[in-house]
Image: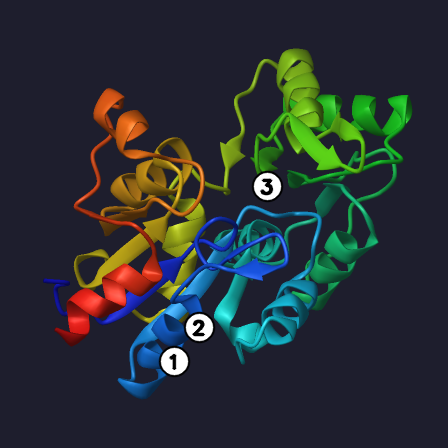
Amino acid sequence: MLPPYTTYLIDLDGVVYRGETLVPGAKDFISWLERTGKKYLFPTNNSFASEAQVVEKLNRLGIPAGKEHVLGAGQASVRNIARRFPGAHVFVIGEQPLIDMVIAYNLPLAREDASDADVVLVGLDRTITYQKLTAAVLAVRRGAHFIAINRDPLLPVAGGFTAGTGTMVAAIEAGSGVTPQVIGKPQPALLQEALNLLGSTPEETVMIGDGLEIDIKAGKAAGTHTMLVLSGKESRESLARSPIKPDLVYENLGAALADVLE
């Protein structure tokens, strides 16, 4: 029987939808959360799609979520900086949506040479230059806090892959000799920001995901309960081989809901 959690952190790809198709029972599960007054949030490592784009996709697939239900690793990173280092000058390796987010949180942008940077924030930047990379390396060497949205080395695109955020993070790490704080899963910071946003504790929360190495590992690191659904990356066979063991396992969100309603 599904325990009486108050808060649900739910991964998207492989849990709620696969591509443009809803996973069986996902819509009914979210409706049940709404109907019973549960708190829920979709924490995503995606630093490419904005929260608004994720919400638009959910709405298009028939799930009436709002922006308050989605927390991307980019926004979580900026929230983390604003809370810990209010007024810090931030040097951004990233694209305009991330820069706009830093400004929206009243954090001043550092100079182009990062000479005044208190924090170096690294996200996906498809126009990164050697000068910008060098500025980031030198700022971190001078003592600026080094924060990475995620360490995903590759970004899937039509026809293959392109370099992901993790590639840029690795270059700055190599040049500075400093290991960054990573916000995205499997590190716990994204989930901790989500709990902070919802006003929940780990003890009353379950992290639901389809990946043992990403979602379940993140939940355990953040101290939440964990639920693996087998509608995405994992199978019974991969679960049996893995040292990472979730608290609960269901075929999909529909099966989890059926367990609640029995």
What residue would you read off at disc 3? Answer: 149
Q: Residue at x 41, y 36 (%)?
A: 214
Q: Secondary structure under badge 1? A: helix
- Left or right of 208? Residue 136 is right
- Taking the spot 62% from the left edge, 19% from the top edge, the residue there is 173
Q: Which mark is residue 27?
A: 2
Disc 1 marks a residue whose amino acid type is Ser
Is label 2 or label 3 in front?
A: 2
The answer to whether the residues at label 2 and label 1 have Cβ atoms under 8 Å apart is yes
Real-space CA distance between mark 2 and mark 3, rounded to the nearest whole angstrom: 29 Å
Q: Is residue 68 visible?
A: yes
Tag 1 residue:
31
The residue tagged with tag 3: helix, strand or loop? loop
How far apart are the alpha carbons under marks 3 and 1? 30 Å
Determine the residue positioned at 62% across, 33% down: 144
Q: Dot 2 lies on which element?
A: helix
Residue 148 vertical position relative to residue 143 in the rendered view, above or below: below
Q: Residues within 10 Å of mark 1 (few under 14, many from 20)?
A: some
Q: Earlier in the sequence, mark 3 or mark 1?
A: 1
Q: Residues within 10 Å of mark 2 (few under 14, many from 20)?
A: some
Residue 163 location in percent, x, y? 75, 26
